[in-house]
Image: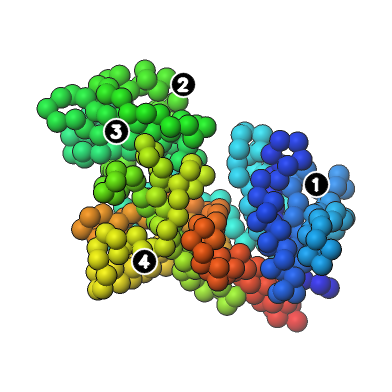
Amino acid sequence: MSKQIGVLAMYMNGRRLEELSFFRKLCVSGEKLGVEVLVFTPDDVHENGTRIHTLTYKASERRWVRKWSGFPQVIYDRCRYHGIDNFRKISQFRKKYTKLRYLSKPLANKWTMHQLLSEHPGIAPHLPATLRYKNTKELGEFLKKHAIVFMKPKSGTGGRGIIRLQRLPGANACLMQGRDSDRRIISARKVTVEQIPARLAGWKLGERYIVQQGIPLELKDGRVHDFRMLVQKDGQGQWRVTGCAGRIGPRQSVTSNLHGGGSAISMESLLRSRFGSGKKVSDIRKEAYDLGIRIAHHLEAKFGPFCEAGLDLAVDPRGHVWLLEVNPKPSREVFSRIGEKETYRRAISRPLEYGLWLIRQKQSESS
C-alpha cells in the first residue's frame, strides 16, 4: 500500500481553500519523500463514511487532481476556525473519526495556555504577567503596575482584536490603540480606564479577553517587532527548532503579524541592530532556542504528541526572552520572506517526515 498523509482543511467562501499554495508545496514535498499528500475537508467525506473526495497536486502535470480515496494513515490538521460553523464541523469530524492518527491537535486558549506554562519553573520567568479581564477596577490596578498593557482575545490569531494601552503620567488616562476583528488599525486616542468598555462595546471583553503585561517592543523608529520561532518534530520524532525570524510591524500598528502588513527580517540582523554583534546576540539566541524546545516538551506532556508549534517571542531591551503566544497551526512564510530557502523547505517537509516516521513505527509494531 502506498504511503498517504491527509491534510484536513476547511472551505472558506464556497469551495475556496485558505492555504492552497501551502498545500501545493506539501504535495510536491511529499512526492520527493515518496508519500502521497491528500487534501480534504469534512465536507468531502462520502455519506457512507468510508471514502473521501480528495484533492492532490501532480507536480509533473502541474495541476490539481480530484479522486476518491480511503482515509489516509495519518492526518495533518490545518483547519483554521473562522466562524462557529467551521468550528462545529471540525469538532464533529474529530469526534466521529477518533481512530485516525492526527499529527497536530487543538491546544488551549491563551488563558489556559498561560496557566499550564506557568507550572514549569524553566518557562514561568519568560511569561508576561497575565489575568482574565473582569472589570475596569482590576484593569486600572494592572495599569498601575505595568506602564503598557495588552488586551487580547483568549482565542484568535493574526493580531485580530488586540488593544494596546499605555499609561499616561499623572492622569487616570491611557493611550489606546490596536486592531479590530478585521485587522483594521485603530489609531491612538486618549481614554480613561472607565471609558474602555464603552469604546469597545460589542467586543465581549468579560467573556473573551485576557489582560497582559506589555513587553517593550518598539524599535528606534517607533515600529513594534517580535520573533516567530517554528518548533517541529523531525523524521525521528525529535523536537527541533526549524528556524526563528524577526517581524516588524507597519507604522501605527501594535502588532507585527505579516498578515497585518508586517515585514520580515532575519533573527541575527534584528538582534545585531539592537545589541551589536558577538556574545550578547549568541546568548539571546541560545536562550530563545532552549526555551522553544522546553515549551514543546512541556506542552506535549500536557496534551500528548503533536508535530509543531509557532512561538511568538519578544526580547526586551535587557536581552531577556519573553513568550508572547503559542500557535498550534503556524504559517511558515516568514522564512520565505527573509530568503532562508533551506529553512522554508524544511518547515514544509518536517510534518511529512514526522508523519512518515509514525507510519513506519505503526508498521513495525504490527509486523
Residue, disc 3: 165
Question: Could you say which disc has been placed on residue 44 in the image?
Answer: 1
Q: Position of residue 75 (x, y in %)?
A: 69, 59
Depicted 40 relative to depicted 358: above or below? above
Q: Quadrant of residue 149?
A: top left
Q: Is residue 58 left or right of residue 192?
A: right
Q: Secondary structure at mark 3?
A: strand
* Total numbered labels placed on residues in the image: 4
Q: Nearer the viewer, residue 239 or 22?
A: 22
What amino acid type should be assigned to the residue bearing mark 2? Gly
Mark sitting earlier along the chain (1/3): 1
Q: Which of these two is toward me, 12 or 110? A: 12
Badge 2 crowding class, 10 Å Cα cut-off, few under 14, some 14 to 19, many 20 or more, is: few
Q: What is the number of the mark on residue 202? A: 2
Residue beneath the point at 75% across and 55% down: 39
Q: Position of residue 322 (x, y in %)?
A: 31, 55
Residue 75 visible, this orientation: no
In the picture, the quarter occupied by the C terminus is: bottom right
Spatial distance from mark 2 to mark 1, Cα to Cα?
35 Å
Secondary structure of the residue carrying numbered label 1: helix
Q: Is residue 275 visible?
A: yes
Q: Of helix, strand and loop, which one carries label 2?
A: loop
Q: Real-space Cα distance between discs 2 and 4? A: 42 Å
Q: In this figure, which residue is indicated by the disc labeled 4?
A: 268
Q: Amino acid at mark 3?
A: Leu
Residue 260, image x, y percentages: 48, 41
Residue toward you, 166 or 54: 166
